[in-house]
Amino acid sequence: MTTKQKAYIALCITSTVWGTSWIASRMAVQQAPALEVATIRQFIAGCIFTGFFLLKGEKLPNLKQMKWMAGMSILLFVSANGLATVGVKYISSGLAALIAALYPLSVVIIERLFYNNNKITGYTFLGILLGLSGIGLVFYENAFHHQQAGYWIGIVVSVVAMLSWSVGTIFIARKKMNINPYYATGFQMLCGSFILAIMTLVSGDAIPLSAIPIKTWMAIAYLVAMGSILAYVAFIYTMKHLEPSIASLYAYINPIVAILIGSVLVKEVLTLNIIFGAIITLLGVYIVNQSLKKQRKALVEPIE
């Protein structure tokens, strides 16, 4: 099997597993506090990542690297992953996945507002409009037809999680640290788990580990083994061996997987409006990504 074939297999793994991780998260938080679930997941996955590299003889990060990883852990694993876990307690995994898929749109807007980067062309604006319209359609279908208690909490925390992920990706792109990305991820997960643990205790919404149902532990095990480790390793592999335009396809597949599998495993409502809304949203995200690629290409092309 060639390296490229392995990379395509890795892409399939990333797309499928990260899509099903939304359902696993929703199943995990039905009978256990969401912040506690996120804490346990990040702590176990962080121990595995860091333990593996420490056993291989990797040196401990220096103070500068630790400060950088602590900041990233707050954005990516506390605000983003932690709040996204809270979100799926109140909204469907499909809607949560769609909101998360909007991050390229928010990156464009944030970079334009705060860094004066990326022109908002007509093509870009069309993509943003379609993305928000699609989410609006799914949101309407859920909010006014199948609303559950805490629905608005789920929407708000999911949007905040998406924005935190956007800011984190911008910071990573602007200030890269010379450290193994897998190793760094492990420390970020560990740091994030300690912060999440404090938030769990402060909130008062915690239960003894012995009281966590076996169904929740199985969901957490899946999130750790498949979502935090296998899928992430596969994602890095695809980024190394496939063109970025191909490797990024997972972002369009994840929400579809979450919506379809969620309707089967956790009986989430699936209507034509939700399907159309998802397609429109992902089309908008695709258009925004294409417009950015055209802008970057124009910057590097020589003037004749």
Image (cartoon, rainbow, N blue to C red):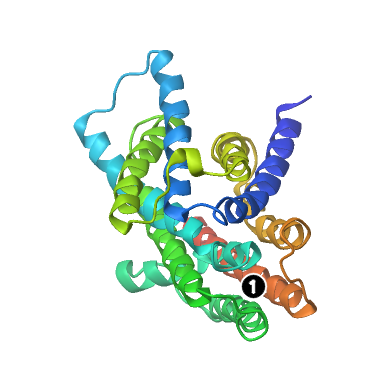
Tell which residue pokes out farthest to the left in this image: 63
At 67% from the left and 84% from the top, the residue drawn is: 145
Left of 270 or right of it: where is 142?
left
At 35% from the left and 52% from the top, the residue drawn is: 200
| Disc 1 crowd, CA 10 A, few/some/many (<14, 14-19, 20+) | many
Q: Is residue 290 visible?
A: yes
Across and down, in percent, residue 68 comes to: 27, 42
Name the residue nearer the viewer: 241 or 103: 103
Disc 1 marks a residue whose amino acid type is Thr
Query: What number of labels is visible?
Result: 1
At 37% from the left and 36% from the top, the residue drawn is: 190
Which quadrant is the N terminus positioned in? top right
Q: Quadrant of residue 80?
A: bottom left
Left of 113 or right of it: where is 220?
right
Name the residue nearer the viewer: 59 or 175: 59
Q: Is residue 243 above or below residue 152?
A: above
Across and down, in percent, residue 151 comes to: 53, 75
Tell which residue pokes out farthest to the bottom in this image: 144
Q: Is residue 70 above or below residue 245?
A: above
Left of 45 or right of it: where is 13?
right
Name the residue nearer the viewer: 68 or 228: 228
Q: Residue beneath label 1, please?
A: 281
At 73% from the left and 71% from the top, the residue drawn is: 269
Across and down, in percent, residue 43 comes to: 42, 36
Element type where label 1 sits in the image: helix
Q: Is residue 302 visible?
A: no
Across and down, in percent, residue 9 comes to: 74, 36
Q: Is residue 114 above or below residue 235?
A: below
Q: Is residue 244 above or below residue 52?
A: below
